[in-house]
């Protein structure tokens, strides 16, 4: 196949961090190949019910096997027509070596071929996303299990709150990926639906054989079929795009977490090391969390695309007048953003360096006030909850002002000193952290193996 003449902007984020298998799914060659597969499957299906002959199928197979579609001419003519299928069909219908040209595109419309080609790409994209989600989920599962007992400060409103474990934190991400995987499988199954309905969606040009042709074409391509046209009913495509945005957002949230926890003042985790990895051009000490930043970038980009995709639901009558064209850019971008983010997230999770000592040391910030709730709940049965809250609140403020510890201030408070235990360790006040890890791992295992059920 000749090289085409498609112009487009250089995009640095995808140039640096694109997931190459997903990029190939939406390449120029793969896009045209999807249309060719759709035309050939239609011809075969029509031959099976006698609409065209087997000689048409063989002629089209030879024409496609020659792989000589002139892409430069295709795109030049498409700019004039507005769509690429008419110019493509004209090339396919040209006689080869004097042979009778095949009957191509019999009873179909442009959108049938382009939509069928698109769902072939989205089906492949769904398989890639499933693979990447499983890789990310497996990496998170290993982290959650390994650090189920690694105590650290939970943070709410960006402030230390109560102790948790790093494993419990990661378990929440694993739960999110588990749900993303389920949604991805459902959306991919839904979107994998052939389109062959003709000009106005009634299949009039296909006649009484329309249903049989649709089923045979779907079987040939490994797709599902629906007797109700979906030329302007784009909900399944929107669902697929929303799943992509959700997965990209999950990876982006993980990237934000890693970037925040790797701040110099926190330093609880860091990305994998490497010579000049994340280096600054002017500050030699810097080790920037570059993978995490790219995850966030992909996630933000995907989120900005989703409102545009939802606008395609407004397509009117029996054929869109502009909304369809928006999909041509949005859907590949969403799938590629999700794949780029997930690939980075899986790599980052696998190589993440966790500093348990820094986590423990950080819980001593502000004199161990991260244990305030634990002290309050210990005192509440004796003082009442509100008085216990006020007592610990005052003690935390004094510890902060005096540069001492919360425990020392409380033990210097005559009213409560006799009520305090010998000591409360943060690791003993992590609630159900371990069982949270167990449940997340169990649910992940079930979802991971659910394919095909």
Image (cartoon, helix red, strand yellow):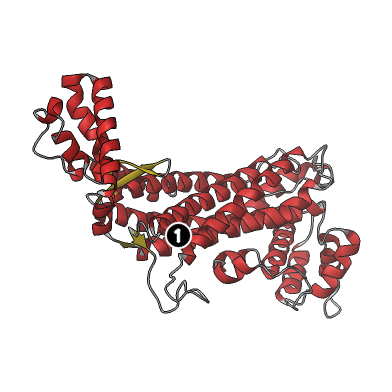
- Which residue is most to the top? 384
Where, quadrant-wise, is the N terminus in this rendering? Answer: bottom right
List x then y, in percent, for residue 206.
80, 47
List x then y, in percent, for residue 256.
47, 54
List x then y, in percent, for residue 280.
50, 73
Q: Toward the viewer: 229 or 357?
A: 357
Residue displayed at 64% across by 51% down = 218
Question: Is any atom of residue 48 visible in this view?
Answer: no
List x then y, in percent, for residue 375.
20, 33
Q: In the structure shown, which secondary structural element does the residue marked by tag 1 occupy?
A: helix
Q: Is residue 53 left or right of residue 117?
A: right
Mark 1, Cα crowd under 10 Å, few <14 / some 14-19 / many 20+, is: many
Q: Is residue 411 left or right of residue 40?
A: left
Where, quadrant-wise, is the C terminus in this rendering? Answer: top left
Q: Is residue 342 left or right of residue 229?
A: left
- Which residue is most to the front? 402
**On screen, residue 439 above or below 357:** above
**On screen, residue 22 above or below 383:** below
Question: Is any atom of residue 349 visible in this view?
Answer: yes
Residue displayed at 57% across by 51% down = 244
Q: Which residue is mark 1?
A: 345
Residue displayed at 68% across by 56% down = 118
Residue 394, picture quadrant: top left
Residue displayed at 31% across by 56% down = 143
Q: Toward the viewer: 12 or 236?
A: 12
Q: Toward the viewer: 48 or 362?
A: 362
């Amino acid at each position: 196949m000749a090289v085409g003449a498609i112009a487009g902007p250089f995009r640095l984020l995808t140039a640096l961090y694109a997931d190459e298998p997903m990029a190939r799914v939406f390449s120029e060659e793969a896009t045209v190949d999807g249309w060719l597969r759709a035309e050939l499957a239609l011809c075969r299906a029509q031959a099976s019910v006698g609409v065209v002959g087997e000689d048409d199928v063989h002629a089209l197979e030879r024409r496609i096997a020659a792989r000589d579609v002139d892409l430069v001419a295709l795109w030049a003519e498409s700019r004039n027509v507005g769509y690429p299928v008419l110019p493509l069909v004209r090339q396919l219908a040209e006689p080869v070596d004097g042979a009778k040209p095949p009957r191509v595109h019999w009873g179909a419309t442009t959108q049938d071929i382009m939509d069928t080609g698109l769902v072939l790409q989205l089906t492949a994209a769904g398989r890639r996303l499933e693979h990447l989600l499983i890789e990310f989920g497996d990496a998170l599962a290993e982290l959650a299990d390994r650090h189920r007992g690694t105590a650290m400060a939970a943070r709410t409103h960006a402030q230390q709150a109560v102790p948790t474990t790093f494993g419990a934190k990661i378990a929440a991400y694993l739960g999110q990926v588990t749900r993303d995987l389920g949604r991805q499988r459902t959306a991919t199954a839904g979107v994998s639906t052939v389109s062959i309905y003709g000009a106005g969606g009634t299949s009039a040009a296909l006649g009484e054989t329309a249903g049989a042709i649709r089923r045979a074409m779907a079987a040939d391509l490994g797709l599902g079929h629906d007797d109700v046209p979906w030329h302007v009913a784009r909900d399944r495509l929107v669902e697929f795009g929303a799943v992509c945005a959700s997965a990209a957002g999950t990876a982006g949230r993980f990237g934000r977490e890693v970037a925040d926890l790797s701040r110099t003042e926190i330093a609880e985790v860091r990305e994998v090391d490497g010579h000049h990895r994340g280096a600054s051009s002017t500050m030699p000490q810097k080790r920037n969390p570059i993978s995490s930043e790219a995850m966030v970038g992909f996630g933000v980009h995907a989120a900005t695309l989703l409102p545009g995709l939802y606008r395609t639901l407004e397509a009117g009558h029996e054929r869109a007048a502009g909304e369809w064209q928006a999909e041509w850019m949005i859907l590949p971008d969403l799938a590629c953003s999700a794949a780029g983010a997930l690939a980075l997230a899986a790599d980052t999770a696998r190589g993440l360096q966790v500093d348990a000592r820094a986590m423990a040391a950080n819980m001593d910030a502000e004199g161990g006030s991260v244990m305030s709730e634990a002290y309050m709940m210990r005192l509440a049965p004796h003082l009442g909850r509100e008085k216990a809250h006020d007592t610990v609140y005052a003690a935390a403020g004094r510890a902060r002002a005096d540069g001492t510890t919360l425990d020392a201030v409380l033990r210097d408070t005559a009213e409560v000193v006799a009520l305090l235990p010998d000591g409360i360790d943060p690791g003993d006040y992590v609630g159900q952290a371990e069982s949270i890890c167990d449940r997340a791992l169990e649910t992940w295992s079930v979802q991971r193996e659910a394919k095909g059920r």
